[in-house]
Image (tube, rainbow, N blue to C red):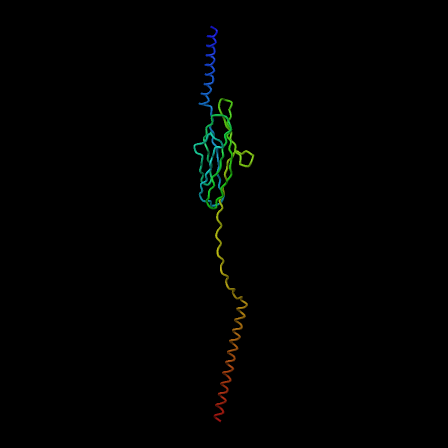
Amino acid sequence: MIRKYKNRYMGFLLSFLFAFLLIPGMAKAEGYSCTVSVPVEVTLEGESAPKENFTVVMEAAAENTPMPEAAEQNVENSGKVQFGPVTYTAPGDYQYVVSQKAGNTENFTYDDTVYTVTVRVVNDGAGGLTAEIWAIVDGEQNKTDRIVFNNRYEAPAAPEKPAEPAKPAEPSKDNVQTGDTLNLTLLIAVIAAAAVVIGITAAWKIRKKTSEIE
């Protein structure tokens, strides 16, 4: 009788414990979760920048870490994107590595910063979960709430114009005037000399005719 009572008591106790453990598990599967998206910003500096597509990548730092459907996001020149939503069903620290793919377009400088992003999931005190996000730049210690990739475009320098040949120096006005004066003086001297020669010749001819007449 006592043994039979003990068996019934133990069976009831085991059933109660089983039901106690099962019910919280079902609640956890249905509502014990939170959803998070990781924001990323891409900027581009430089005047007259042509269109360029930048690609940012999110990778899990450990196995079995929840991941968004799209692990790569494309941004044309400048803009904001989000990795997510990602659903978490258990408290813990979940870490990711966020970086930008290096491009090879001429005159562009691509930001090669690498961020380690932590999503810390905790109980919210009301039967659910909540999360906080922060990032740390590789090689640094300070936390930041912004994941930003700053790219730059340097416009190519304009080609230099070929040097123009040197022009011959123009004579100064003084030289021109002096040359004109010399030329005029020489011309007058030649005319005067010609006149003297003509006068002498004419006088000689007149004297010769006079001599013949006599």
Q: Is residue 212 above or below residue 181?
A: below
Which residue appears farthest toward the bottom when viewing the image?
214
Q: Position of residue 94 (x, y in %)?
A: 50, 30
175, 113: nearer the viewer:
113
Q: Position of residue 169 (x, y in %)?
A: 52, 64
Which residue appears farthest toward the front when viewing the image?
3
18, 67: nearer the viewer:
18
Looking at the rendered structure, the number of numbered marks drawn on it comes to 0
Q: Position of residue 2 (x, y in %)?
A: 48, 6
Which residue appears farthest toward the top when viewing the image?
1
Q: Position of residue 151 (x, y in %)?
A: 49, 41
Which residue appears farthest toward the left when viewing the image?
69
